[in-house]
Amino acid sequence: MKRFSQLIQQLEMSNKTNDKMLALVDYFNEADDMDKPYVIAMFTGKRPKRPVSTALIRQWAIELSNVPEWLFAECYHNVGDLSETIALILPPASSISNRKLHEWVDDLALLNDKDEAFKKQFITKAWDSLETSERFIFNKLISGNFRIGVSNKILVNALAKQSDTESSKIMHSIMGKWLPSEINYGDLIKGTHVNTDNSWPYPFCLAYALEVAPSSLGETQEWQAEWKWDGIRGQIVKRNGELFIWSRGEELVTEQFPELHFLLQELEDGTVLDGEILSIKDGKVQAFSILQQRLNRKTIHKNQLNDAPIGFYTYDLLEYKGRDMREEPLSNRRQSLETVILNLKTNQVVMLSPIVPFNQWDELAKLRERSRDLNSEGIMLKKLDSLYHSGRKRGDWWKWKINPYTVDTVMIYAQKGSGRRANFYTDYTFAVRDGDQLITIAKAYSGLTDKEIKEVNAFVLKNAIEKFGPVRTVKPELVFEIAFEGIAESKRHKAGLALRFPRIARWRKDKNADEINTLDDLRQLLQATLLPPV
Amino acid sequence: MITFTNKGIYCKQGDFYIDPWRPVNLAVTTHGHADHVKWGNKAYLCHELSKPILQHRLGELNIQTLPYHKEININGVKLSLYPAGHVIGSAQIRLEYKGEICVISGDYKVEYDGVSTAFEPVKCHTFVSESTFGLPIYKWQPQEDIFNQIRNWISSNRDKNQTTVLVAYSLGKAQRLMAGLAGYGDIYVHSSIANLNDVFSKAGVILPYTIPITAETSKEILQKGIVIVPPVMAEGKWIKSLTHAATGICSGWMQVRAGRRWQSADAGFALSDHADWPGLLSAIKATGAEKVFVTHGYSAIFSKYLNEIGIEAEEVKTQYGDEEEEENIELNKD
């Protein structure tokens, strides 16, 4: 397990995608062949059943480390991760085991039908045979909850590079059905358990943000306007009797959205749709925070199917009757797309993203103001004669987003930045008022000028109250207006809600800390976004 | 015998302060880190080896020095210094008045680091302890294990044609790294470290051979050697200009993943000049103190724990604990 532990440390130390990828390539070149499918399973969230509860693990760790419960809790609070806290707080191992990763995983799986005494003996013995970094890995194997910033995309790119295979094939292969104990690495990479010939997606065509007045785009009749939806960009591929749904991140998400599986029967072979995966209920698009309940889930609860039913607003056709359509102008693609959608028997699930009719730019600007009522983020402008480009190309497609939400907050924590700002406090945590308390609502890193950063930095140096590692608590005095794109309920945040894409809009030197917004203000906003669209 | 005032730790009978943060007549100084010694006091008293550091950092001062273990009398208070093992010249201050003994430890570590004089426990009635790493998650690996990790990392950097850059405080950690890595390649040091090394050499401290980095130092030479820079340089342009720099931070905070991830470095080594949890506890028990005052660090948690295990303890607010600021001050001076 030492090689894997080394990999995890490398992955955690780097925030550069390419470094992570190279670390993974090295790992797959050097690691034990038996371990590799287990690592792929772990990183793609294929979780074995948890053999021991968190409460028991915690209790045993407290016993062994001989610290009072409250002190353990303080340590946990400081470390922020239970597996790591336990790894650090236990006494040093009395001997070091050389067991391999897959052996540990298989042994843990066998624990499931054993009694508590047996489990305790196994786990405490394991702890006593592992060094700190491996203990941490071992604890993560128990919880099965490995969040280390490796997306499927990075993993797939690494595997593709290591094995010299096309990445879409590997994505398809590892997203398929397989068990690490029953497949070897070579077969998994070759995708012998699936047929990777049918699934390949096209690169998405992306739009730039419109930063000038739309009237500078010229004649209105050369342009098609659509609502800009706030969902997950998706590509639906139907070929040779198989259906695949790819997300913008080029991840295969077919299993997550059973509502769209009817397309397997209703779409012709050789059809590829581009559009937005949304939660659509009673014909109305719901807020992104509702869609969020459906993302990255292995199993979908009945309530979730009810509360957040999935729909697809399609706006482009990339393949039609087996022919690549990307060199056709948008107007032609749209025509064929309309035919495809009209031929569907199931209604109200996969629909055409409507065209927003307009004659004057002013008129469109007025319509755009209403975007939020439809749970849309603004307007998309696409040139009628535009081809379907690979990636981003300036000029043909524009996103014209509405202004974000804002909230006035006070800064309560500061932390030094990275890169050229490493010596300044540039990363701040903001709070709103909740009765006579302040409650954390967002963290933001950007949005101030260098001059303002220096000013805030000086404030932090003078007004730091406490130090928690690199973090300083500061006197709650500075008021900042935070802009954000959405708001959602969140059990993981103390405030009970989370802001989407928060950033500093401006420093409100004109306001003082008793004029900031309250948690109630945000709760009301949350409720308002959850109401069905008008 | 001591009180905690808004200027620092005060000994009333002797009428002097220990590590004051505001100007006073006599500042008894535990060691040369910037959070423990400020400019502007009328007179300073410190260990012989701290004197050149103070002069280097603060200019010409009125400084009286003492070797370890020698006792002097100030207004009836017997004062002597004992090694704190933190950095070169660091001292615990032992005060005795009418049979009552109080020890102010400043910053300390119990493991011998090969450079600073080894920590000595001192029996006392009252002990003032730091608590920088006063949580049971902080348990250092033996220094030799950490150095082996650093050496292995250096070898692997060389295999990949990367330039090894170690980030360490110029006073203390840098000298410790030099000692631990002597013989593993030519050691190149940033000017702030080189200047301190000169100061030590003049004071008779024997340090391993190092080469100061100048504008003329070629990138090829650095790539083959080992580069040591202070934290303030860690993310600067200069490192980016090196050939495939791999940076490694040496600090106790590297023990925890969140601490490692927060830094944009390539490696983190939990090498600290402060006592870890077992170190703090053993040091405090060895003093036999009836009362412990806990200063900078996890002071609330650590004093609560001491009380629970039957050692009377009290948390004290001070302005110590930010060695980082030291490096910024230096940069401004250069």
Image (cartoon, grey):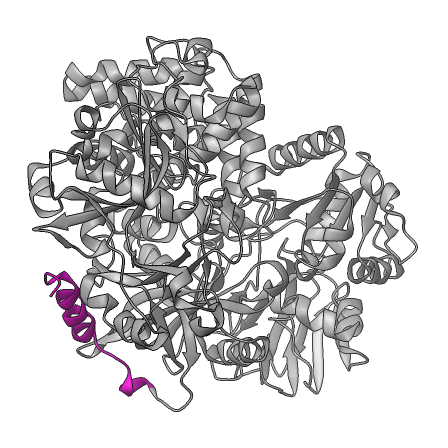
Q: Which quarter of the figure has residue A10? A: top right
Q: Residue at x 18, y 39 (%)?
A: A342
- Which one is nearer the viewer's eye here, A311 or A14? A311
Check the picture and name the quadrant holding the C terminus of chain A: bottom left
Q: Position of residue A241 (x, y in %)?
A: 26, 18
Q: Position of residue B203 (x, y in %)?
A: 85, 61
- Which one is nearer the viewer's eye here, B117 or A521? A521
Q: Is residue B221 magenta?
A: no
- The image shows residue A357, relative to residue B185, as above or below, that is below
- Which one is nearer the viewer's eye here, A517 or B49? A517
Q: Position of residue A154 (x, y in %)?
A: 48, 34
Left or right: residue B191 versus residue A315 is right
- Region rendered in magenta: A513-534
Label total for image: 0
- The image shows residue A418, relative to residue B102, as above or below, that is above
Q: Position of residue A175 (x, y in %)?
A: 33, 24
Left or right: residue B299 versus residue A298 is right
Q: Residue at x 19, y 62 (%)?
A: A374
Q: Is residue A530 magenta?
A: yes
Residue A117 in view of the camera? yes
Q: Residue at x 10, y 50 (%)?
A: A281
- Magenta span: chief secondary structure: helix
Q: Which quarter of the figure has residue A348? A: top left
Residue B317 in view of the camera? no
Which residue of the protein is positioned furthest toward the right in this rendering? B216
- The image shows residue A155, relative to residue A373, as above or below, that is above
- Which one is nearer the viewer's eye here, A164 or B177? A164
Q: Residue at x 41, y 75 (%)?
A: A505
Which residue of the protein is positioned furthest toward the bottom in this rendering? A510
